[in-house]
Image: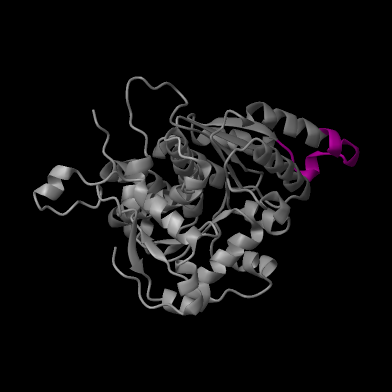
Amino acid sequence: MSRPTQQPHRGRMWAASPAFRRQLHLLRALLPSPPAASLAAGRSPSPSSSGSSHLRAQAMAASASAGAVVYEADAEAVVRRITPPLDRSRHKGQAGKIAVIGGCREYTGAPYFAAISALKVGADLSHVFCTKDAATVIKSYSPELIVHPILEESYSVRDDERESVSSNILTEVSKWMERFDCIVVGPGLGRDSFLLDCVSNIMRHAQRANIPTVVDGDGLFLITNNLGLVEDNSLAILTPNVYEYKRLVQKVLNCDVNEETASEQLIALCQKIGGVTIMRKGKADLISDGKTVTHVSTFGSPRRCGGQGDILSGSVAVFSSWARHFILSNEQSTDKRVNPMTLGCIAGSLLLRKAASLAFEKNKRATVTTDIIEYLGRSLEDICPVEH
């Protein structure tokens, strides 16, 4: 591990803290040690086999002013480690069951992008819970998705029916909830007040059931105005873009975004909300659970077409569920576990960037979201080939 650059006093205190050292050690430990034969022959361990390759100790130059050390994630190693093998003993559902909560009269593309991306990454089943108006449209996009037309907007519900309709919606979603490995809340959700109230109830139920939840798009609008929906939820992931992050910082920290202390501010935001993992999307994605900050800077595409955040949310949902299963199956004690939500963010960030790069290489300015989705499978195969 290379030595990080000199840090200000607060950064040195953070880097020396037991929480930071423990998380860094656990991230490294996800990969096996290099084979003894390699070391005996005097060969350097490859990035995929080195026990320290999960986090390359390359402190960002900006961290000197940020007051916290930011480490570049070895995202390819993370993907290889948490992606489950394909073998003949597996049955339907074991590679992941994902649900997207979103889709209304105005917005049908976003929930489709998130749900189909989950399938393209490798989930076995992908559901969409949306309004009746959106359901037929989303179904027409792909027969691969399981679409539930159960959500309602204000215009379709009388005032005296709201309580009973809201209760019925929660009851219907609850029948499915414990089957899911992760849910995604927000793509195409809209901002109808009644619909947001119904989704708030769904989020509370998911937290009680210990279902990991990725919050994106209008879901971030919802939780920014109701932080109790994600407070102290270690299975919640927030994926804000620059504007959503600005609103979140202003609401929670009561200040503006400060790029000079970006990593320190991100840690403070996670800690203030309590327990959540945040992926701050940008030129480089910054990821923190309030303990460590990791950084994914693989170049993707200069084309910024809408819908890429939906691809990311579906991908992160799958990788987070895989990471959680991987860590739980290794029977580590709770205090020694690395945060699977962090690993899911790292893997999802890398895969989107690689797929976007391949799509742009072919389509240039004409690149759209569906082009990127079609490269998700190839991108994952390039990193983690299927063994026949």
Q: Where on the picture, by quarter, is residue 175? A: top right
Depth check: 265 or 350 in front? 265
Q: Residue at x 35, y 75 (%)?
A: 5
Q: Is residue 40 left or right of residue 374?
A: left
Q: Residue at x 60, y 64 (%)?
A: 269
Q: Residue at x 68, y 65 (%)?
A: 252
Please check the rendered image and state whether residue 17 is part of the magenta-colored stretch, yes or no.
Answer: no
User: Looking at the magenta stretch, what is its main secondary structure?
Assistant: helix
Q: Is residue 43 left or right of residue 213?
A: left
Q: Which residues are magenta?
A: 151-164
Q: Is residue 19 above or below residue 85?
A: below
Q: Is residue 39 above or below residue 96?
A: below
Where does residue 135 sit, x and y in percent of width and height?
62, 35
Where does residue 225 sit, x and y in percent of width and height?
73, 58
Image quadrant in which the C terminus is located: top left
Q: Where on the picture, by quarter, is residue 24? A: bottom left
Q: How many marks?
A: 0
